[in-house]
Image: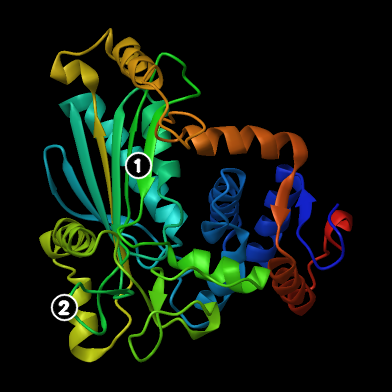
Amino acid sequence: MAAPGGPRRVQAAILEAYARDLLAAGGFAADHAEATARMLVWANLRGVESHGVLRIPRYVEMVEQGLINPAAAIRQVAGKGAVAVLDADKAPGAVAMNTATVRAIADARVHGIGWCVVRRITHAGAIGIYAEAIAAAGLVGLVMTASKPLMIYHGARTEGVSTNPLAIAAPSADPGRPLLFDMSTASVAAGKITAAKDAGRAIPLGWAVDAEGRETTDPAAVKAVLPMAGPKGTGLSLMIEVLASVLVGNPLLTVALRDGSEPGGNGIAVALDPQAFGAAPGFTASVSDLAAVIKALPVAAGAEAVLLPGERGAAERARRLAAGIPVAAGTLNRLAALAAKHGVPVPPDLA
C-alpha cells in the first residue's frame, strides 16, 4: 500500500471485478461489462495505464450520452470469401473487437486468411489484446482501429487525423510469449495525458499542443496530440483510415472534419494461418529463432538490454500479477465517485 495520495496496489482479480461492477452499474450489459473490464485490466497489467481502468468514468458517460449502445446487436453487412464486414451498432469497443477477432480466426482456418472489419464501434482500448488472442490461436494477427480527429496533421495547426493504432502479433515456440508489437501513430496515446492528469504530473514537450497549437507540458491544457515521427505518423494514420473506414463505406474523418459530428470508430482484425503460407509446422520455432538472434545482439551503450516487441509488457505483467497493479490516486478518486453515484461497493483494499 502506497502513502496517502499516492498510487495504491491492488490485485488484478479485485480490480477487474471492481471494473466489471462499475461498468454494469453504469449501463453495460453483464457480458459487455465483463469483456470490457478484462480488456482494461489487461492494459493495466502491462503497464499501459492510459488504456486501463481510468477509462471507466468516460465509458459510463458514453452510455449516458448514447454513444455506447448497451443493447447493441452486431451483424454482418458485407463480405466475400475471407472478407467480412460487421456493423457493431455502437457496441462497446471490446465487445465489437472480440467479435471481429473470433470471426477473423474462423475465416483464417478456412481460407488461410481472415480479414474482418467492424464498423460503428466505440473505443477499442489496448488493441494488443486482440492481436495476442489471434497469436494464441497459432495464427499471425494484425489489428488496426480508426476514430475521430484527435491528432495534429503534420503541417496543419489543428486536428486532422486520429491516433489510429496498429498491433501485430506472431506466435512463438513458447505459447505464452508471442512477439507482440502494439503502437499508436501519435507521439503518445491520449490516455497517457489523462494518466498524467490523474497522477498530478507534467507531460514532456513533444506530446501535445494547446488550443493555440503551441506545445504544452500541462496535461489540463491539451487540445490535441502530436504525431509520431511527423509526416510518418500522420501518413500511417491516414492510410489506416482508408483501410478501416473509407473501404467499408464509413469514412470517419471526412464526416467529422466537415460537420464536427461524433463519427464513432471502426476496427480491423486480420488473422493469417502460417500453414497457408508454407511456414507450418516450423513457423513458431522460426519465430523463436528470430527472437533469439535479435536478443543475442550486443547491447548498446546506455541500454539495459535488447528487448523484443511485447517483452517489456510481459515482464511488467509478471511483476504486477505478483505485487499488484499500482492505480493512481486521481483514478481511484474518480472511480470512487462513480461507485458512490451508482451504489457500487468499493473494495476494502481501495477504500
Q: Work out which residue is located at the far front of the displayed protein and give it.
A: 301
* Contact? badges 1 and 2 (CB < 8 Å): no
Badge 1: how crowded within 10 Å, few (<14), some, or many (20+)?
many
Give the residue pinned by disc 1: 101
Residue denoted by label 2: 254
- Give how far across and how far down residue 161 sits, in percent: 24, 71
Q: Colour scheme used in the picture?
A: rainbow
Is 85 placed above or below 132 here? below
Check disc 2: other Cα within 10 Å, few if <14, some if 14-19, many if 20+: some
Q: Nearer the viewer, residue 78 or 276?
A: 276
Q: Position of residue 253 (x, y in %)?
A: 21, 75
Relative to residue 315, is residue 231 drawn left or right?
A: left
Identify whether 160 is placed above or below 195.
Answer: below
Residue under the image location 61 percent in, 56 percent down: 30
- The residue at 82%/63% (across/down) is 346
Displayed quadrant of residue 27: bottom right
Left or right: 184 as drawn, with respect to 30:
left
Which quadrant holds the C terminus?
A: bottom right
Please report whichever mark, 1 or 2, sits nearer to the chain's N-terminal start: 1
